Image: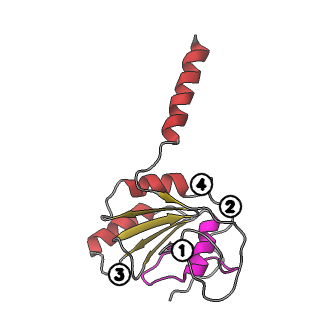
Amino acid sequence: MKRAVFSLLLLSLTACGNKGIEGVQTFTYAAGDHRSGSLVYAENPPAGGPHNPIWQNCGVYTQGLYNEYAVHSLEHGAVWITYRPDLEAAQVAQLKTLVEGRPYTLLSPYEGLDHPVVISAWGAQLKVDQADDKRLKAFLDKYEQGATAPERGASCSGGYSGTR
């Protein structure tokens, strides 16, 4: 009897952990495609694909990042939160609080977003209208060092720390 209850509890916890996050789009990209120069991506901002051989150091940035370095960080298991440069300071502060203490995150402004905030991981992306949207934390919890990252655990420091 105890074994059946434990199995049912484990099954319930697994189902909850696999529950989808409303609005997340997913994509399939091959890993390890290192290229130099400026690249064109299908998503804006990108959620995977070819990238520079050097990754972007994780952290909070006040200027835009080069896609090619940030995508390499996604391959390592980082999550990249981008926001419109004109986003209210209070919302930017909320995003900074959200990533505080998380070693595999990037936060930066991004020109030309079709939503105020876009969160991306390797092969996944969510677009939201407010920095307090609870799905942002759910996305971080699921994708930071998550199973979709081809090289999760690889460094998110010691790479490129510049901005556009």
Residue closest to the eye, 73 or 43: 43
Between the C-alphas of marks 4 and 3, the distance is: 28 Å
Whether the residues at callouts 1 and 2 have beta carbons within 8 Å, the answer is: no
Q: The N terminus is located in which quarter? A: top right
Task: State whether residue 123 is above or below residue 46.
Answer: above
Q: Which sits in the foreground, 150 or 103?
A: 150
Q: Which residue is at the front of the view, 38 or 85?
A: 38
**Residue 4 at x, y percent in the picture:** 58, 16
Q: CA distance from mark 4 to mark 1?
A: 22 Å
Name the spot of residue 20 as percent of width and height, x first. Answer: 47, 47
Residue 144, by quadrant, is bottom right
Q: Which residue is mark 3?
A: 85
Q: Nearer the viewer, mark 4 or mark 1?
A: 1
User: In terms of secondary structure, where does tag 2 sit?
Assistant: loop
For the point 55% across and 29% down, the residue is: 11
- Give coordinates of residue 113: x percent, y percent: 39, 76
* Nearer to us: label 1 or label 2: 1
- Kind of residue at badge 1: Ala
